[in-house]
Image: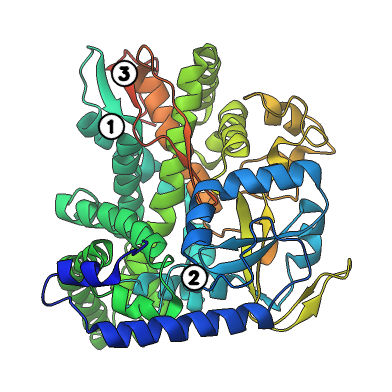
Amino acid sequence: MIITNLKSYLEALPQEAALKPLPIIIASVLAAVIAVVFRLSTASKLPIINPKGTFEFSDHRIKANFQQNAAKLLREWFSKNPSKPVVINGDLGPMTILPPSMIDEIRNDPRLSFDEATMEAFHSYLHGFEPFHLSDSHHLTKAIVRKDLTKQLAKVTGPLAEETSLALSDILTDSTEWHEANVRQTALHLVARISARVFLGEELCRNAHWLRVTKEYTVESFKAAEELRQWPYLLRPIANRFLPSCLSTQAMLKEARAIMNPLLKKRYAARDAATSAGMPYVESNDAMDWFASADPERVHDAVNFQLAMSLAAIHTTTDLLSETLLRIAKNPNIIPALREEIITVYRSDGWEKTALYKMKLLDSTIKETQRLKPISQISMARVVTESLTLQDGTHFKKGARLGVTSTHFREASIYENPEVWDPYRFVRMRDDPAKQNMAHLVSTTPEHNAFGHGQHACPGRFFAANEIKVALLGILIKYDFELPDNADPRVYESGVSLVSDPMVSLRFRRREAEIDLDTA
């Protein structure tokens, strides 16, 4: 957000949000001075692709330029300098972007913090953004994902499939007539619901109020975080009190508590009653009980945890599912082969844990989509917690920020015909004994680090992969779909974010399925 006339802006604010101009001016000047001092103290000797002027104290121009051109600037730099780091001035200040050749050097370095980078980007210290604090400043959520969610994948596939069938009938209807539906909204509704089935069970996964809150919180919190990043650090707590997106985020969090607290109280009461009676407590196979078991002293906030889980599940999976549907619709010749694979495997394995693993073309189709359109032009964002020097001499002071480019996903030296969407690309790689372990959707490598790489690789990627496969195969088997005439989906770029077209629709109609996915 850029304010060109502070006086007019303040006069336009509601009375309860209006603030005294003098304190804001003083704080703005102080913020600018601190920003300059910090910039000088952490300055890098590397080239900067969008430099600030020597006496340019305001970040307004540079942040606006970053929002419009960051992804393009990075593509241009690394196309000419594929092995050289570069600095980009972003919405959180300068950030060093490393080439993929440096991934293995930094991936497990304890002096580089993923948690700090995420909390900084999503303002976890501010009211309304508490779920981002729980998911990244504590290790509880990640431990639950690794210990419970990932180990329970075989048990949750059936419920995921059941909920997908029910949700698709509600979202896309059972009409055999062609009708249009917005792709992103379809994916958002579907992912929110089937994620809730695993995290909260049947009790809340079909609760329209809860689903609305989780979807709106996901959308609004990312929007609010981006808007706050346009403000100087010292002014963000003030902006958080009146920006509409921030107020909406806070309201959604309040609603989430009102919905969940009675249910949590009921669960905890059942646990306490079993303990008092000396009886074993029979756990539900959902994230509410996983959290309660991992936090027996009830120190942490269970509502923040549930929203953190929903955020992690909904945001990236919605985008990848949307983009995959669009890629398939643009290349409909692949649909018969995908359906044939799904039908063959399902008739043999049903929903056994081997089924999704055997759907190689489905896996490859999704991974290829992610290769051509990752969710960001950078990955592996980190904050430096101790000064360090890399092998090439690149030095980082404490507090510096860095990440790794994803521009190499389209490098001809890595991928043959890199600009072509080839759904069989990773099927072929999987058939090569030397490369098969690199070819899975959940595999992380320096060549394909969309899920990160190393000790901070996304711990929820195994669940996300299963979830998107179940959703996608459900649509493929139950529905025909196609692009409307003259539809031309594109990727929206904002800063380093790459977003699947949120405006485009597909035409759907219910088809006669060759297999009954509801009876394994």
* 436, above or below 62, in the image: above
- Closer mark to the observer between disc 2 and disc 1: 2
Type of amino acid at the residue the image marks with label 3: Arg
Circle 2 residues within 10 Å: few <14, some 14–19, many ≥20 = some
Q: Check disc 2 and report its element: helix, strand or loop.
A: loop
Residue 89's disc is none
Percent x, y for residue 373?
56, 38
Q: Provide residue 369's location: percent of width, then percent of height.
A: 57, 33
Task: Please tell me in which quadrant of the rendered image residue 174 appears.
Answer: top left
Task: Give the mark nearest the N terminus, 2 or 1.
Answer: 2
Q: Position of residue 25 (x, y in %)?
A: 35, 82
Where, quadrant-wise, is the N terminus in this rendering?
bottom left
Is disc 2 in contact with disc 1, using a CB cutoff of under 8 Å?
Answer: no
Q: CA distance from mark 3 to mark 2?
A: 47 Å
Q: Residue 18, relative to residue 359: is it above or below?
A: below
| Residue behind mark 2 | 58
Residue labelled with disc 3: 507
Mark toward the start of the polypeptide (3 vs 1): 1
**First along the sequence among labels 3 and 2:** 2
Q: Quadrant of residue 312?
A: bottom left
Q: Can residue 201 be spotted in the picture?
A: no
Give the SS element for disc 1.
helix
Badges 3 and 2: C-beta atoms under 8 Å apart?
no
Label annotation for residue 168: 1
Q: Taking 154 as reference, is 227 above or below it?
A: below
Q: How many discs mark residues in the rendered view?
A: 3
Q: The disc labelled 1 sits on which kind of residue? A: Leu
Residue 74 percent location from the top left of the image: 66, 48
